[in-house]
Amino acid sequence: MTYKVPRRIFQVATIGLVSMGALGLTYYCPYTYSSVTDPMRVLQFYIIERIVPWYALGILFIAFGIFGRGFCGWACPFGLFQDILHVFQEIDLPRPVHMILKNAKYVMLVGILAVCYYTASPFFDKINPFATLVSAIPRWLLIGFAVDRWVIIRLTFFFLLIISFLFIHRFWCRYLCPVGAIAALFNKISALHIHLDPSRCTRCDECLDVCPTKVNVLDVVRKRPTECILCGACADVCPNGALELTFSEKIIREPLPSEGRHIPSPYPVPPSQYIRRDYPRPEKKPISDINLRKLRAVRGRIIFFFENETLIPPYIKEIQKLPNFQVWLVNMQESVNLVEHYRLQEPAVFINGRIYTGSMDEDTFVAHLFSEYSMLKRLSLAFDTSKCRPCRSRDCMNVCNQIDITFESKIEVHPLTQMDCFICGCITTCKRGGVALVYGEPKIDFTLNVPHLESLQDKLLEVTPMTVKAFIERDSVHCNKAITMLAAISHLSRGKINFELIDALEEPERSKAHNITVLPTLLVGQFRTFGVPTEGSLILLIRRNSRWKS
C-alpha cells in the first residue's frame, strides 16, 4: 500500500483548519496570530486561566494514545512545509550532537509551560514558527503590520529555521517541536505502529535511507522509539512490502516465492519420492565477522613459528591483513637463527613478545588478543628521574626510541598504549633500577634485583613455556613490584614465561575459584606464592613448576 498520496491529501486538507488565525478566529483573543487547532495554544490558555485542562488533556491523550506521533507525520501542515523545503543533500549531524538535540524538545516544552505560568501570557505564540506560517504571515498580508521588536524576532527565528529545513530534514520535528514532545511520550503505547514481516525483509536498507527522522526501522518495530513520526515513508519504498502501518498485530504472511524455494509440482509424484531441493551451502569464512570486529579495536604483534605451512590457521592469515596488527609467519626450517634465539623445540606463537600457551581455537585466540591489549591499556611505565639524571648511557632509550623523559617531575608516568610499547626490555636494560611497571597510581619501590635475575637467564631460557597468573589490585606498591618482576623475568626468558594480570576486585569469581586471600598472589600450575612476592619466591615458583634442577 502507498501512504504518500493519502498523507499529502490529509496534510493539505488540514491547512484550512489551522489557518483560521489568519481570519481572526483564535482560541484566545488577546493574541490573534495563532491557530485555533494548535495544541500548545490550548494548553497555554488553560495555564493562563489557572484551570486544569481536563477536556483538552483528555482529547490530546486519546488522540496521541491512538495515533502517537502519527499526528506529526499525517496531520501537521508544518511537516509538509518542511518536506517541501528539504531540497539539498542531507547533512548528518554527529551522533553526540544528535543525542543532545533530540532531547531539546522536552526542555522546550517544560520551558514554554513554565514561562507561560509565571508571566500569565502566551509567550510562545510570539515566536511559534507554526503560527507564523499559518496565521501571522497570512494575516499580515491581509491587513498589514507595524514593525516592532517581536516581529523582527519572530521573522528572524522563522527564517533561521527555514535555512535548517533546507539541509536537515524535519529539523523542527526532530529537535524542537513541543507538540511532538507530547506525542512522543505516547509512541511506545499508541495503537498505530509499524509492522514488519521478517519473512519478506531482505535487509536492503532502503527504509533507512528514506526515513525523515533517521531512525532505524528495526528499532521502530522492536522498541517503538519516540523519534518515529509514523509517516509510512519506509513502507512506501520497501520493494517486498515487508512494512505497513497498522492498528493491530498482524499475522505473518506467506513468504515471497523465490528461486530455490519449494513450489508444488503440477505432476503427480509417488509417495515414496520427494522433490529434491538444493540449498546453497553457507560460505565458510577464514575468520568470523564478530571476531574481525573485535580485532579492529586492538593492536598487537604476533610471531607464528611453523614447520608446515598448511597447518597455519586461516584466521592468522586474515589477522595479518589488518593494519593494526604486525604478523610474522616464520618457517622454522628456514629461520634457524631465530629458532635458536628463542630456544624452540616445536612450533609456537608469540604475542607481544610473550609465548601463547592457550588453545589455538579461533574464539579463544581472539579473546586472548583482546584481553592482552586490555591489560596493556591499564599499565604504564614509571621512571625515577633521580636515577635517570646521572645516567650517561641512556640504555633504555637505545632499546626503545619511544621513551622520552622530560625530567619535569620526580616520577614520570607514560601509558604503554600511548608509547606503542609492548614491554620489550627497558626494565632489565636500566642498570640503576629506575624503570618500573605500574597499575593505577605510581606507587613504586625501585629495588628490583636485576643482576640476580640476569644470573639465572640461562636457566630461564630452558624452562617449559608457562603462563603465570598474577592476582593484583590497583594503586598497590607490592602489586606494582610484582608486575615489574614478571615483566623482567618474561623478557629475560625471551617470552617463554608469559604472565596474565587479573584484577581480583573486578573479577571476584576467579579470585574465589583460586582461593585468593592475599594480594598480590602469583599462581602457576599447582604452585603459588605466599606473602609479598620477591625475586627469590618468584624464581622458586617457576623452578618448581618447570622442575629444573639447580
Image: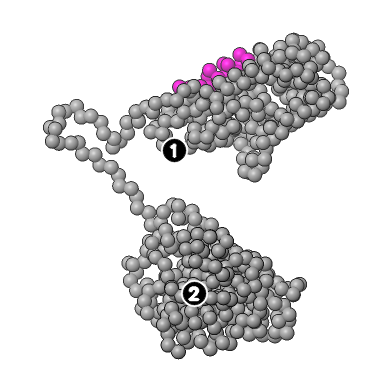
Task: Decide if residue 226 is on the left or right side of residue 272.
Answer: right
Above or below 209: residue 319: below
Rendered image: mark on residue 295: none
Image quadrant for the C terminus? bottom left
Residue 61's x, y, as percent? 62, 21
Q: Would you name the residue on which mark 1 appears?
A: 203
Tell me where residue 520 appears, x and y as whole percent.
57, 71
- Identified at 75% across, 72% down, the residue is 409
Give me the residue at 77% from left, 14% from top.
28
* Numbered range of the magenta stretch: 1-14
Residues 11 and 504: in front is 504
Q: Residue type at mark 1: give it.
A: Arg
Q: How far separated are the C-alphas under marks 2 and 1? A: 54 Å
- Residue 177 lies in magenta, yes or no? no
Magenta includes 10?
yes
**Secondary structure type for disc 1:** loop
Identify the residue position indicated by label 2 in the image: 528
Q: Main secondary structure of the magenta part?
A: helix
For marks 2 and 1, the one nearer the N-term is: 1
Rendered residue at 42%/70% (across/down): 357
